[in-house]
Image (tube, rainbow, N blue to C red):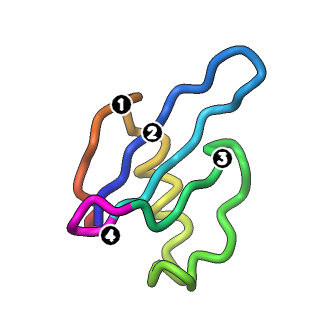
Amino acid sequence: MYIIKVKGKAKIPDYIQLRDEAFVLIAYFRADRPLKDLHRYGLEGKETELAAVIADLEFGKLRPLAI
């Protein structure tokens, strides 16, 4: 799985994208909202680790998500 932070413009907020191994979009959520429904993506119980990864992400840089 891969993760990327997308910079918003004007009134559009920043977003986080989760993509699978074929780079297909599997999740798209606001970077400033609490993480929820992570069980859908196989990330249940990893909220704090994911929040730390999101805080360290640079905009527009695709990174493998290994948590």
Question: Circle 1 sits in a helix, a strand or a loop, which is it?
Answer: loop
Q: Badge 4, how many Cα within 10 Å: few under 14, some, many 20+? A: few
What distance separates the C-alpha of mark 4 from that of mark 2? 17 Å
Residue of label 4? 67
Q: Position of residue 15 (x, y in %)?
A: 58, 41
The residue range painted magenta reads: 20-24
Q: Are marks 1 and 2 in contact (CB under 8 Å)?
A: yes
Residue of label 2? 5
Q: Badge 2, how many Cα within 10 Å: few under 14, some, many 20+? A: many
Question: Circle 3 sits in a helix, a strand or a loop, which is it?
Answer: strand
Residue type at mark 4 is: Ile
Q: Answer left or right for 9 relative to 1.
A: right
Q: Which numbered disc, 2 or 3, marks the residue that appears first in the sequence?
A: 2
Above or below, comparing residue 10 to residue 30 in the picture: above
Q: Position of residue 45 (x, y in %)?
A: 54, 82
Q: Position of residue 43 (x, y in %)?
A: 47, 78
Residue 60, label in figure:
1
Task: Tell me the residue at 25%/48% (across/down).
Answer: 63
Question: Circle 4 sits in a helix, a strand or a loop, which is it?
Answer: loop
Which image quarter is the N terminus in?
bottom left
Task: Tell me the residue at 45%/84% (across/down).
Answer: 42
Above or below, comparing residue 38 to residue 48 in the picture: below
Q: Which numbered disc, 4 or 2, marks the residue that appears first in the sequence?
A: 2
Q: Position of residue 64 (x, y in %)?
A: 23, 56
Queried whether the magenta region covers residue 46, the answer comes back as: no
